[in-house]
Image: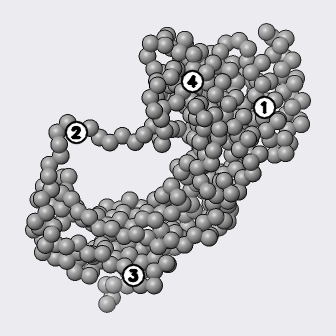
């Protein structure tokens, strides 16, 4: 008895030392422009996709040229004017990318023979706890053919060029100090405002939803030991998020350190899923089951693996050379930017930056007249424009 006391004390102290962790959330938008049309179904010269916590919330492509919601709550909560302005913003960015993908190709010494890709990703991340949110980071990155081309250093308010070909753009953009300040402000304020607003919209919509999990059990040969089987339990389609899943042997829960868990992950419809697996000896004669509890259940659900079937199940070998199934490109297109609070994009080319800056600022004023109080910035931009004209 005396030997047990220190162990209890340690557990209590550890519990006191671990702070409560909040939920992390992200809002990202990614644009992707191809250097030429590839004439393949589902592949477009230009696409834009918005992602809230890695789930698609809106989408645009160069064929339909209409920004559309990808979640029902986005359609319900946001007025038609929001989508109209978002469509105009996407069309403007599509033209911007048409010009600048050619400029970057010239910098890189590439021609139209091969396919090349220019991307822009920007957005923000926060941590939410006790009804409050804390800004974690802001991102604005450009990539070319899958490699970093240019990125914004939010802490030091400057652009970073990881390749020599991006240095001229870095210098031009850093010379427009007011533009860099605006980019920082967008990432830390406007982006966060939209992120928290979208989270609230989603939360209000999901309050109406109460969905029990569908529970499935299955098995396969272990990928690391042919004498073992991997037993997997999947619970999916449930809401709220909280769920308890135990894999049991003879009705005794297996310790978590023996299990492989996906953690609770979101589905694209706002529900959640959880997957847990354990490896056992193929000839093991014990009874295994998956025990799941959820607020929508009156009683816990138990799904059993048939150990007799496990012993005699023949798992055919994989076919040599069989290609992997590929996700259609249209479903994995990169993310996009906020429709009516986009940060301005200066032109990548050497000359004409003042003209592009004026175009972008003008578009921003039209789109977010009610959201941004930028009278002071407007006056400063006019001064900057005149200064740039005098320099040119």
Say whether disc 3 or disc 4 marks the residue closer to the N-terminus. 4
Is residue 284 positioned above or below 36 on the image?
below
Contact (Cβ within 8 Å) of mark 2 with mark 3:
no
Q: Evaluate whether residue 136 shows in this view.
A: no
State the image coordinates of residue 257 (x, y, percent, origin top left): 31, 66
Q: Which residue is mark 4?
A: 161
Q: How is the image coloured?
A: one colour
Say whether disc 2 or disc 1 marks the residue closer to the N-terminus. 2
Is residue 43 positioned above or below 12 on the image?
above
Q: What's the distance in space between the residues labelled 2 and 1, CA to CA?
A: 50 Å
Say whether disc 2 or disc 3 marks the residue closer to the N-terminus. 3
Q: Is the residue marked by circle 1 packed among few (<14), some (14-19), or many (20+) residues within 10 Å?
A: some
Q: Which residue is mark 1?
A: 363
What secondary structure is found at the residue carrying circle 1? helix
Mark 2 vs mark 1, foreground winner is 2
Q: What's the distance in space between the residues labelled 2 and 3, CA to CA?
A: 41 Å
Q: Which residue is mark 2?
A: 322
Is residue 386 positioned above or below 183 on the image?
above
Contact (Cβ within 8 Å) of mark 3 with mark 1:
no
Q: Is the residue marked by circle 2 packed among few (<14), some (14-19), or many (20+) residues within 10 Å?
A: few
State the image coordinates of residue 88 (x, y, percent, origin top left): 72, 34
Quarter containing the N terminus = bottom left
Say whether disc 2 or disc 4 marks the residue closer to the N-terminus. 4
Q: Residue at x 32, y 42 (%)?
A: 325
Q: Which residue is mark 3?
A: 300
What secondary structure is found at the residue carrying circle 4? loop
Q: Is the residue marked by circle 4 packed among few (<14), some (14-19), or many (20+) residues within 10 Å?
A: some
């Amino acid at each position: 008895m005396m030997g047990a006391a220190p162990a209890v004390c340690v557990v209590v102290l550890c519990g006191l030392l671990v702070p409560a962790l909040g939920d992390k959330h992200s809002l990202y938008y990614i644009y992707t422009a191809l250097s030429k049309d590839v004439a393949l179904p589902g592949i477009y010269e230009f696409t834009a996709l918005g992602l809230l916590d890695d789930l698609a919330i809106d989408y645009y492509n160069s064929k339909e040229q209409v920004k559309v919601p990808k979640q029902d709550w986005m359609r319900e909560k946001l007025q038609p004017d929001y989508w109209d302005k978002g469509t105009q913003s996407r069309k403007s960015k599509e033209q911007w990318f048409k010009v600048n993908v050619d400029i970057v190709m010239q910098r890189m010494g590439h021609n139209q023979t091969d396919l090349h890709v220019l991307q822009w990703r920007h957005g923000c991340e926060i941590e939410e706890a006790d009804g409050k949110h804390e800004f974690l980071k802001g991102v604005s990155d450009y990539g070319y053919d899958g490699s970093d081309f240019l990125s914004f250093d939010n802490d030091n308010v400057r652009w970073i060029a990881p390749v020599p070909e991006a240095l001229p753009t870095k210098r031009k953009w850093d010379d427009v100090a007011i533009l860099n300040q605006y980019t920082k402000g967008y990432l830390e304020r406007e982006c966060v405002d939209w992120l928290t607003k979208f989270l609230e919209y989603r939360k209000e919509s999901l309050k109406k939803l109460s969905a029990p999990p569908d529970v499935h059990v299955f098995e396969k040969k272990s990928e690391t030991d042919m004498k073992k089987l991997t037993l997997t339990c999947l619970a999916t389609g449930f809401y709220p998020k909280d769920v308890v899943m135990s894999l049991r042997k003879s009705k005794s829960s297996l310790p978590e350190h023996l299990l492989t868990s996906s953690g609770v992950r979101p589905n694209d419809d706002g529900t959640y899923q959880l997957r847990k697996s354990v490896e056992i000896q193929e000839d093991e004669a014990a009874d295994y089951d998956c025990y799941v509890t959820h607020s929508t259940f009156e009683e816990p659900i138990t799904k059993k693996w048939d150990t007799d079937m496990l012993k005699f199940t023949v798992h055919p070998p994989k076919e040599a050379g069989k290609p992997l199934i590929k996700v259609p490109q249209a479903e994995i297109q990169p993310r996009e930017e906020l429709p009516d609070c986009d940060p301005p994009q200066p032109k990548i080319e050497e000359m004409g930056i003042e003209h592009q800056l004026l175009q972008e600022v003008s578009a921003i004023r039209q789109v977010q007249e009610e959201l941004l109080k930028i009278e002071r910035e407007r006056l400063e931009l006019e001064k900057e424009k005149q200064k740039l004209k005098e320099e040119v």
